[in-house]
Image (cartoon, helix red, strand yellow):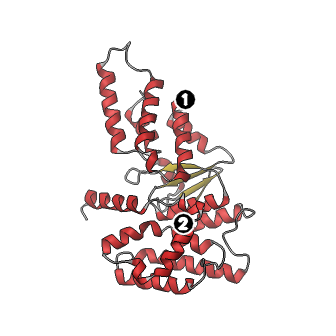
Amino acid sequence: MPQNRKEASIVLRSCGWSEEVYSFMHARKKLCQEAASDTAPNDHETKNLLISHAKRNFLSKVPESLKAGLIERLRLFSQGSSHLELDKRSKMADELVLLDCLVSMFGMRVRIALAEKGIKYEYREEDLDNKSTLLLETNPVHKKVPVLIHNGKPICESRIIVEYIDEVWKDKSPLMPSDPYQRAQARFWADFVEKGEELEAAKKDLIDALEILEGELGDKPYFNGDTFGFSDLAFITFYSWFHTYEMCANFSIEKHCPKLIKWAKRCMERESVSKSLVDPITVYEEILMLKKKYGY
């Protein structure tokens, strides 16, 4: 077995661990304790069993854009790497590490930007009830995801991260317009979307904000015009949460803003978006679980 439950859970947590994985771990530990020492499975065998279980019960629910990083982390663990060694790998030069939470609409922004640029990175799932030391060290002010760590240097806040990505890899699929006025407009509407986060609890205000955005979109394919860009990226991740808003507030976004829904479906035709956004039902189920857990 791994040296202790904490070490095993850290590795499994990086893969979005679940109650099923915990149950498996407890059952496996009990069997090993009951077995004679000469018949107990060795460390390598147990790790492979943990990996197989994690793949079957979790990876099928993970967006395609995240699977490669999680599988690679599991592979290294199966070869004997401890969670400390894996953390050390994150600090190597020319590496990108994204500290994130699967259903975070703000983390999805960063994932889309990286996918648009075709940039490889290591994904690290954070347990927001038990934040990692790495998250607390790299974002000591807000202690929130997402955090992008580039060559050991952390960048925080999703919009800032997206602009950083666009500037560093500016030769690949630019997200910001080249014209200064158009860049200013893109930032304005991205800022408007950001303030919309504060309106989620008020249905009328949310609908009003969405209608303003639909008015700005008009008949254009994207907010930038003919090309997918910064404003689209800032807003499209809310699409994963539309179903939750509708279910919790009992209204239809499509009824009020049909053009926005058409725009969202158009964005979903982009591989970078469809493989980065979490399924709306998964988001809703996660919110229901949190409501039950915290009693609201």
Q: Is residue 272 visible?
A: yes
Position above or below: 242 against 54: below
Percent across and percent down for residue 150 are 64, 53
Percent across and percent down for residue 127 are 41, 51
Looking at the rendered image, the quarter that the N terminus falls into is: top left
Looking at the rendered image, the quarter that the C terminus falls into is: bottom left
Give the structural element (helix, strand or loop) at label 2.
Answer: helix
Q: Residues within 10 Å of mark 2 (few under 14, many from 20)?
A: some
User: 195 and 221: which one is in front?
Assistant: 221
Percent across and percent down for residue 67 are 53, 47
Quarter residue 273 falls in: bottom right
Residue pictured at 48% horizontal, 25% vertical? 44
Q: Which residue reaches farthest top?
A: 38
User: 27 and 253: which one is in front?
Assistant: 253
The amino acid type found where label 2 is placed reads: Met
Query: What is the number of callouts on the image?
Result: 2
Q: Is residue 157 visible?
A: no
Which label lies toward us, 1 or 2?
Answer: 2
Residue pictured at 37% horizontal, 18% vertical? 40
Label 1 to label 2: alpha-carbon separation: 37 Å
Residue pictured at 31% horizontal, 24% vertical? 31
Q: 136 left or right of 173? A: left
Which residue is tagged 2? 268
Numbered label attached to residue 79: 1
Q: 1 left or right of 221? A: left
Position above or below: 109 against 148: below
Position above or below: 241 against 255: above
Percent across and percent down for residue 211 are 46, 85
The amino acid type found where label 1 is placed reads: Gln
Q: Residues within 10 Å of mark 1 (few under 14, many from 20)?
A: few
